[in-house]
Amino acid sequence: MDKNKTLFPEWAPEELVKEYNRMKAETDRGWKFYAKTDEDELEPDSYKNWAIEAAERDKLTGVLFRLLTKSDMKTTWPIIFSQPPLDTNPNSNRLRTEPEISIWNTINWALKEFISQISDPRTAAQKSKDRIAISTKAKALA
């Protein structure tokens, strides 16, 4: 029996299932390498950064898994596929032919960007300034 048939519902986009399998295999290889590698074999900062990257990749794989299996997505994917292409670049048909990959790449990029932003050390004054800016924008939107 095909592993994908049991792991993912039939409505899950095939291209994203392939992307999940690729990411999962890469993550699993990374964790195996990490488990075999002695911390003393790598520079301390390199070892720490590698562990952070592996954990982030693991989180992204989990997000994609939920997009492929959460029952709410059963009705969402057909809506996504029925939308006209958002890509205005006439030289690129990627969004038209693979909207699920384009959407996943956007989500993936946004999550990585968010993770890097929250990992940057900020002073209490910077955090307060950011909270005030968010509050002001939220009030304007309301």
Image: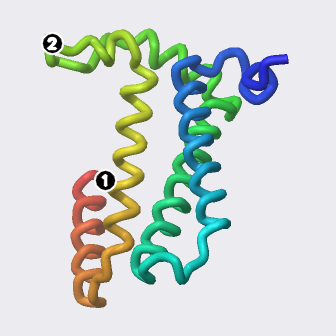
Q: Specify the quadrant that holds the N terminus.
A: top right
Q: Residue furthest bottom?
A: 124
Question: Which picture quadrant has residue 36?
Answer: bottom right
> Residue at the location (27% across, 61% down)?
139
Residue 138 in the image: state x and y as whole percent.
Answer: 30, 59
Return the residue nearer the eye: 132 or 105: 105
> Residue at the location (61% across, 50% down)?
29
Return the residue nearer the eye: 57 or 103: 57
Position above or below: 35 against 93? below
Q: Which residue is mark 2?
A: 91
Disc 2 crowd, CA 10 A, few/some/many (<14, 14-19, 20+): few
Q: Of the residues shown, which amino acid type is indicated by label 1?
A: Ala
Position above or below: 107 against 84? below
Question: Which picture quadrant has residue 92?
Answer: top left
Query: Disc 2 on helix, strand or loop?
Result: loop
Residue 116 in the image: state x and y as whole percent.
Answer: 34, 64
Return the residue nearer the eye: 137 or 31: 31
Q: Of the residues shown, which amino acid type is indicated by label 2?
A: Asn
> Residue at the location (60% across, 70% down)?
37
Question: Considering only order in the chain, which callout, 2 or 1, is on the residue closer to the N terminus?
Answer: 2
The disc at residue 27 is: none
Question: Which picture quadrant has residue 106?
Answer: top left
Q: Which residue is mark 1?
A: 142
Q: CA distance from mark 1 to mark 2?
A: 39 Å
> Residue at the location (26% across, 11% down)?
93
Query: Disc 1 on helix, strand or loop?
Result: loop
Q: Residue furthest right?
A: 1
- Choose mark 1 or mark 2, whichever is in front: 2
